[in-house]
Image (spheres, rainbow, N blue to C red):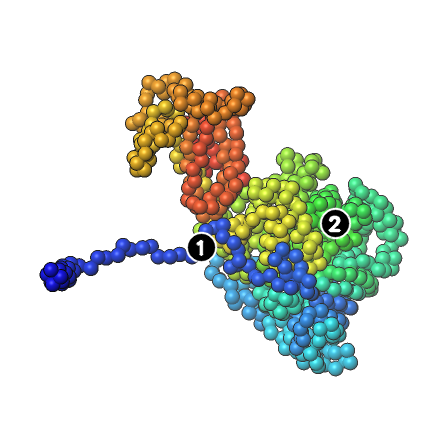
């Protein structure tokens, strides 16, 4: 018996083996490949720098945070006849870093206008179809203007020459020994350069020449300036190609500027010899201006400026300015300047709001410039910190908008007969608000403009929008015929044309300055809109304002990075905003949300097909479920047209029994009885994650708006479902009714009951 069993078993194995050999090997079902976490709500750890002792995970400066200091003593000479600037500066550089420095880097920004500058060579050029004659001559016939620095000498404190190397807009200076932590190094530079006409070459500084032969000078980037050395990248010695602006250390300045004696000059810092350069009449008017809080006081009138313009003095006068803890220095000078001032209360101290402008700016400038300065200081101080300097100056330059500590140039010129359009007026007011606002970002909250333009231009444009609306309230007569200031940037709908444009010509906000497409939209408009939406739609003004002020105060007179801003906004608000920063700042995704479908249901006491399928699959009975409320889709096979003519709630005894069995009499009295039930599917064709704002309109014309947080998309980035139970029939659904999410396509935003 045992032997027979063994033979049978062996035969069975052979048979199985033969069958196995004859059958094809089963193919394992194909599985989808694994994937990385692409959820738009994942944390930003991959994008952000690792926190350390210099910059904390909260976004605040760390325990070992440091920054360098560069102090300047300068003597400057303006040669008005030859349009030439000459200077000698002594720099005392303090190494507050923990590192030994082998050499120093100095910025020579004027070299971008050197004849040999490679900056024009990197630009794309095409022949114009119909050029203006002067543009055509400039491009094809004229020799390029030579406005680069001429470095006469670089010497140490002992007067001996220091080895130095100039590479485009950067100069490396070799020190006799390494500069140790805590050490100071003093050296001097003598230089000169030809001043450019900023109207013809669109430069940030230079002169404008008037028909009478006089000039108005707005002078900046005029001296060799220390580069930044920090914990993020060591020396910030990226070349200046003309677009990405500046990264500069803080320091103290003593600057003596010699100009023709009939010039009116103002600039960064306290004027220390006012009685020497002001006439007695000017001094008297200045004292009155310090007590005037509503009306600017004329220090130099148009008639006085006209008189000086005719004589053109050849004698000289030196204006002495001293500034503490500033990152840069600028000044403006001309014998054609009208000069006015008024005081503005900021916190518990007075600040002087100042304007300088030629008669070509009147009457617009005399009417509004200084008032705009004063209003701006109040608005920005409310949103950030009290303005710490003693003055803020607005200088009229025909087509220029540019900023420096305590001083800026602004455009906006009436027609020759003194008339001006609303467009000219509001552009002038807007640019003054913007450039005065730059005193806060980046002159005090000192971000790296060479890398991240949005950190000063974007944040500033956002605050400009806030300040423009404040100005409407302070001076309602100024914004007529509008009810509020007609802001160009800030509101969500203003950025839609850009974000819905050609993706090949759009770059993320987090793009290095020189590589940005559509510079104005990317660096100014989009971040301003992002922050407006963050404030008004996502976080709410109270939480946002607290966090934004926290960031501003943490980093005033310091060097923040993008991570410091992102982290601080979350740290001070308890808002997880990684999804927001990623979408708005690291991608070119756009916002597009809509209503995909709306399905109405009625209550039924009869089990529907979905419920039957459910219990059949589990081998249970209807009685096992206990009391249930069933919903039947209107228009489906299970829908009973006869019952539908009645009020849906009355069709269901089960619902009433459920209420009786599960709620107390007191609770039942508080319950509302929904009669209409809807399932709504919302879609998101756009990649940008945003809150879903929905306005529901009912048959009695009442409305209800619900804001579903952005996290509603966290598990399905394409579509989500919401159910709605209501006593009233639903007639209309509208997504983003007030255009607060920059939705680029509103064709899918509405549903109306058929």
Can you see residue 550?
Answer: yes
Residue 27 is drawn in which quadrant?
bottom left
> Depth-wise, is mark 2 or mark 1 nearer the camera?
1
* Residue in view at x 27 percent, y 54 percent: 29
Against 239, residue 378 (above or below) is above
Give the image location of residue 519, x and y in percent: 54, 55
Residue 470 is drawn in which quadrant?
top right
Disc ID at residue 386? 2
Q: Residues within 10 Å of mark 2 (few under 14, many from 20)?
A: some
From the image, tell me which residue sits under label 1. Answer: 37
* Residue in view at x 45 percent, y 30 percent: 724
Give the image location of residue 37, x and y in percent: 44, 55
* Secondary element at image label 1: loop
* Sequence-wise first label, 2 or 1: 1
Furthest toward the front, the residue is 1
Residue 181 is drawn in which quadrant?
bottom right
* Residue in view at x 71 percent, y 58 percent: 557
Relative to 526, 153 lies left or right: right
Relative to 527, 595 lies left or right: left
For the C terminus, the image quarter is top left
| Residue nearest the viewer, comparing 541 with 92 | 541
Please count the marks in the image.
2
Give the image location of residue 196, x and y in percent: 65, 63
For the N terminus, the image quarter is bottom left
* Secondary element at image label 2: loop
Q: CA distance from mark 2 to mark 1?
A: 44 Å
Q: Residues within 10 Å of mark 1 (few under 14, many from 20)?
A: few
Against 751, residue 206 (above or below) is below
| Residue nearest the viewer, comparing 279 with 485 | 485
């Amino acid at each position: 018996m045992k032997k027979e069993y063994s033979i049978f078993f062996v035969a069975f194995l052979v048979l199985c083996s033969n069958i196995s050999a004859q059958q094809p090997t089963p193919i394992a079902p194909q599985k989808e490949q694994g994937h990385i976490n692409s959820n738009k709500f994942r944390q930003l750890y991959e994008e952000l720098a690792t926190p350390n002792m210099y910059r904390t995970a909260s976004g605040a400066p760390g325990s070992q945070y440091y920054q360098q200091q560069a102090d300047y003593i300068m003597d400057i000479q303006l040669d008005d006849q030859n349009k030439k600037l000459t200077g000698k500066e002594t720099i005392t550089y303090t190494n507050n870093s923990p590192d030994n420095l082998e050499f120093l880097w100095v910025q020579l920004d004027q070299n971008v206008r050197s004849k040999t500058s490679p900056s024009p060579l990197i630009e794309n050029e095409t022949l114009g179809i119909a050029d203006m004659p002067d543009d055509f001559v400039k491009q094809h016939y004229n020799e390029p203007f030579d406005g680069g620095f001429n470095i006469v000498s670089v010497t140490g404190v002992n007067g001996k020459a220091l080895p130095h190397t100039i590479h485009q807009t950067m100069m490396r200076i070799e020190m006799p020994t390494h500069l140790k932590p805590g050490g100071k190094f003093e050296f001097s530079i003598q230089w000169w350069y030809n001043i450019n006409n900023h109207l013809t070459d669109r430069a940030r500084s230079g002169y404008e020449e008037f028909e009478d032969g006089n000039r108005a000078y707005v002078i900046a980037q005029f001296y060799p300036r220390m580069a930044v050395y920090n914990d993020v990248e060591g020396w910030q010695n990226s070349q200046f190609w003309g677009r990405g602006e500046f990264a500069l250390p803080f320091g103290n300045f003593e600057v003596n500027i010699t100009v023709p004696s009939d010039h009116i000059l103002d600039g960064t810092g306290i004027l220390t010899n006012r009685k020497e350069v002001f006439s007695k009449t000017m001094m008297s008017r200045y004292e009155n201006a310090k007590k005037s809080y509503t009306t600017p006081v004329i220090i130099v009138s148009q008639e006085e400026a006209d008189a000086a313009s005719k004589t053109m003095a050849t004698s000289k006068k030196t204006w002495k300015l001293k500034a503490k803890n500033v990152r840069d220095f600028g000044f403006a000078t001309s014998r054609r300047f009208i000069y006015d001032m008024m005081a503005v209360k900021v916190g518990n101290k007075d600040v002087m709001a100042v304007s300088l402008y030629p008669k070509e700016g009147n009457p617009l400038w005399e009417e509004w410039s200084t008032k705009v300065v004063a209003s701006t200081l109040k608005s920005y101080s409310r949103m950030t910190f009290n303005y710490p300097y003693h003055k803020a100056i607005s200088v009229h330059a025909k087509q220029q908008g540019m900023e420096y500590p305590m001083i800026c140039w602004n455009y906006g010129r009436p027609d020759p007969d003194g008339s001006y359009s609303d467009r000219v007026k509001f552009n002038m007011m807007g640019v003054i608000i913007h450039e005065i606002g730059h005193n806060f970002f980046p002159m005090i909250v000192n971000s790296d403009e060479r890398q991240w333009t949005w950190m000063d231009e974007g944040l500033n444009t956002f605050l400009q929008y806030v300040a423009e609306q404040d100005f409407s309230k302070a001076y309602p007569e100024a914004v007529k015929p509008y009810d509020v200031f007609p802001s160009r940037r800030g509101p969500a709908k203003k950025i839609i044309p850009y974000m819905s444009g050609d993706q090949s010509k759009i770059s993320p906000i987090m793009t290095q300055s020189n590589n940005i497409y559509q510079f104005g939209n990317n660096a100014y408009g989009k971040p301003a809109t992002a922050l407006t939406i963050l404030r008004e739609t996502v976080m709410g003004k109270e939480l946002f304002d607290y966090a934004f002020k926290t960031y501003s105060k943490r980093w005033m007179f310091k060097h923040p990075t993008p991570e410091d801003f992102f982290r601080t906004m979350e740290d001070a608000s308890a808002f997880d905003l990684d999804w927001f920063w990623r979408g708005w700042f690291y991608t070119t995704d756009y916002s597009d949300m809509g209503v995909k479908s709306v399905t109405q249901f009625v209550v039924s006491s009869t089990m529907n097909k979905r419920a039957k399928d459910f219990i059949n699959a589990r081998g249970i009975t209807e009685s096992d479920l206990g009391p249930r409320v069933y919903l039947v889709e209107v228009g489906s096979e299970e829908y009973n047209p006869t019952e539908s003519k009645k009020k849906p709630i009355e069709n269901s005894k089960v619902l009433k029994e459920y209420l009786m069995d599960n709620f107390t009499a007191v609770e039942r009295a508080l319950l509302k009885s929904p009669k209409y039930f809807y399932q709504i599917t919302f879609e998101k064709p756009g990649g940008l994650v945003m809150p879903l704002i929905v306005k529901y309109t009912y048959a009695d014309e009442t409305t209800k708006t619900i804001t579903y947080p952005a996290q509603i998309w966290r598990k399905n980035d394409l579509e989500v479902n919401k159910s709605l139970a209501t006593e009233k029939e639903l007639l209309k659904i509208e997504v983003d009714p007030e255009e607060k999410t920059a939705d680029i396509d509103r064709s899918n935003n509405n549903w109306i009951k058929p």
